[in-house]
């Protein structure tokens, strides 16, 4: 899949995480490279600046409409 087409989009991503549990992340895709997707959670309440995960862990992606 061409994940680069979603760069700059606000998304919600469902992945298979640790111990085969599903994890959901929401934010703006800032980069896709070397098999990893980088998401900026864009949330002042988080101390996390970015989240990176392997694209082969993605189960589904929701792309939000721009306002």
Image (cartoon, rainbow, N blue to C red):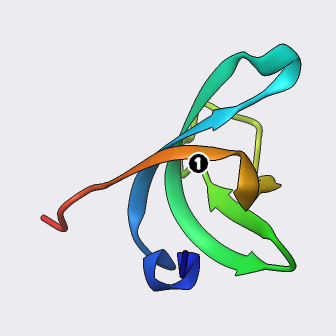
Specify the quadrant that holds the N terminus.
bottom right
Q: Secondary structure at mark 1?
A: loop
- Is 49 rendered above or below residue 30? above
Q: Total number of numbered labels?
A: 1
Residue 50 visible within the image: no
Left or right relative to 32: residue 26:
left
Tell me which residue sits at (71%, 60%) in the image. 55
**Residue depicted at 68% across the width and 77% down the height:** 31
Can residue 31 be seen at all in this image of the molecule? yes
Dot 1 crowding, Cα within 10 Å, few <14, some 14–19, many 20+: many
Which residue is situated farthest in the left direction here? 67
Q: Which residue is rendered at x = 56% and y = 67% of the image?
A: 29
Q: Is residue 28 above or below residue 41?
A: below
Q: Quadrant of the C terminus?
A: bottom left
Q: Nearer the viewer, residue 26 or 17?
A: 17
Taking the image as shown, residue 55 lies to the left or right of residue 7, namely right
- Front residue of this view, candidates 24 and 1: 1
Residue 24, quarter of the rendered image: top right
Going 50% across and 62% down the picture, which residue do you hit? Answer: 28
Query: Is 12 left or right of 31, judged from the image as shown?
Result: left
Residue 19, horizontal then vertical, whole percent: 86, 15
* Residue 26 vs residue 67, the one in the foreground: 26
Residue 44 drawn at (x, y percent): 56, 40
Front in this rendered view, residue 51 or 62 = 62
Image position, residue 6 (x, y; %):
45, 75
Q: Which residue is mark 1?
A: 41
């Amino acid at each position: 899949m061409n994940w680069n087409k979603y760069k700059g989009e606000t998304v919600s991503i469902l992945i298979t995480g640790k111990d085969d549990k599903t994890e959901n992340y929401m934010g703006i895709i800032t980069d896709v490279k070397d098999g990893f997707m980088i998401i900026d959670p864009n949330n002042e309440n988080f101390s996390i600046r970015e989240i990176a995960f392997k694209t082969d862990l993605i189960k589904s992606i929701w792309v939000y409409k721009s306002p």
